[in-house]
Image (tube, grey):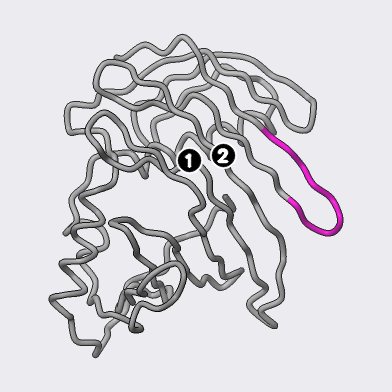
Amino acid sequence: MATYTKEADVETTQEDDPKARETLREVFGNTARWDADFKGFTADINVNINGTEETGTVTVKGPKEIELTIQDEKAKEFASENLGSIAMHRGPRSFDESDGKYKLVFGDDGTHPLGRSIVMGGDGMGSFYRVKDGRIQQINRKTPRFSFSINIEESVKNAEDKFLTKKYSVYYFNPENQGLKNVESYTDNYTRVDKYDLPEQRRIIDCQEGNCVVSTMTLSNHKML
């Protein structure tokens, strides 16, 4: 997914809705995460960007603690960015440290096919989620460079009965005219090592301006630190 800098939180007059808060808290609790005992892992890695392959090893300790032996800068950047994103979303954190720190309110009555919207007042990005069947089905945010909508297409449950996202698409829009810029389609697979669900493969199909680039990141021989 395209990188962006989180906008600073802003003051809001939006009143918090306890029912919206409890709904999102439940959804947050249904999502698979590594626990506080997670120290990291090592693995062999293969990166394939539209047919050009690079191999090496990787050590992942956290979103900003990733070491790769891959030499090619493009492949290294692709792997680092995506492993960092996975580590951030799987990493241990509480509801109050993340979405729970904002003013939460329902945005509609829930008749939308992807569920009821929950607006996050004060996050500085005009964010709102859609939730249905106990999990987030859509994420919407705005940045100065682009706005985007993440749409969840398929999830699986792990050994603890928590959700892992398997397939999703990201739609990027031009902030000036809201025209569609590009679409990225993600497919993720996981492998179970000890009590952790670790990334095994990520495939991204990125389509823009009449061209599609297909990239994969495949990890094997995982070992916990």
Q: Secondary structure at mark 2?
A: strand
Say which amino acid is labelled 2: Thr
Q: CA distance from mark 1 to mark 2?
A: 6 Å
Residue 114 covered by magenta stretch = no
Q: Which mark is residue 187?
A: 2
Give residue 87's quadrant in the image: top left
Whole-percent x and y of residue 165? 43, 43
Q: Which mark is residue 178?
A: none
Do the residues under discs 1 and 2 have CB atoms within 8 angstroms? yes
Q: Is residue 223 above or below residue 179?
A: above
Region rendered in magenta = 207-215
Q: Secondary structure at mark 1?
A: strand
Give the camera-side residue of 20 and 74: 20
The residue where tag 1 is placed is 166
Residue at 54% across / 27% down in the picture? 201
Whole-percent x and y of residue 93? 22, 46
